[in-house]
Amino acid sequence: MFGKKKQPPIRSLIGEGTVVRGDLHFTEGLRIDGEVIGEVRADPAQPSILVISEKGVVSGPVTADHLIISGQVHGPVHCAVLLELQPKARVRGDVRYQNIEMHPGAVVEGSLTATSLEERPLLKLAASGGT
């Protein structure tokens, strides 16, 4: 994912039942199990990971290097390195990515655009795992 570099740690959590209203900027890693109404943006100066769990909801733009979505995003998504859309992911907005992994069942209501036109993006179709 980040070459030979270690994945950034998840140091912050928006817990289930918590609602954050306003823009949220973070460094390294963030997990959202609650709801964020506003922009969620990682610091572009260092590697980042954002996890939106099955119960997580973001209403606003989302930007991170590595993004794992299992819940809902209502707004545009920009992922600089790897976007993982898990089976229950629901994205309503345009998605920009460098590499994408989309599991069966994930839904995107918007356009999918590769961020680098010079390089062919990696598209992985994940197996359903026998379920």
Image (cartoon, rainbow, N blue to C red):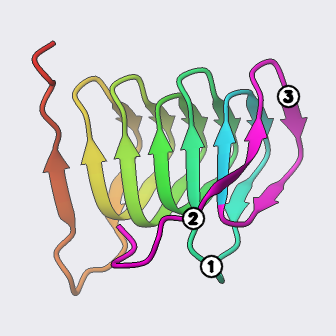
Residue 77: where, in percent of width, then height? 53, 53
Relative to residue 46, is residue 128 depicted above or below? Answer: above
> Within 10 angstroms of label 3, few (less than 14), some, or many (20 or more) residues?
some
What residue is at 65 percent from the left and 42 percent from the top? 31
Quarter of the view holding residue 106 = top left
Residue under numbered circle 3: 19
Residue under numbered circle 2: 8
Q: What range is drawn magenta here?
A: 1-28
What residue occupies the far right of the structure in this picture? 21
Q: Distance between the residues labelled 2 and 1?
A: 9 Å
Q: Main secondary structure of the magenta part?
A: loop
In-front residue for pair 13/111: 13
**Amino acid under label 2?**
Pro
Relative to residue 42, is residue 19 depicted above or below? Answer: above
As helix, strand or loop, the secondary structure at mark 1 comes to: loop
Reading the chain from its start, which is encountered first: label 3 or label 1? 3
Reading the chain from its start, which is encountered first: label 2 or label 1? 2
Tell me whether the residue at label 2 lies in contact with that at label 1, contact meaning CB atoms closer than 8 angstroms. Answer: yes
What residue is at 16 percent from the left and 75 percent from the top? 120
Residue 57: where, in percent of width, then height? 65, 30
Q: Distance between the residues labelled 3 and 1?
A: 26 Å
**Amino acid under label 1?**
Gln
What residue occupies the far top of the structure in this picture? 131
Kindly identify which numbered label has been placed on residue 28: none
Q: State left or right for residue 37 relative to residue 68.
A: right
Q: Does residue 74 belong to the magenta stretch?
A: no
**Amino acid under label 3?**
Val
Residue under numbered circle 1: 46
In-front residue for pair 84/2: 2
What residue is at 57 percent from the left and 64 percent from the top? 8
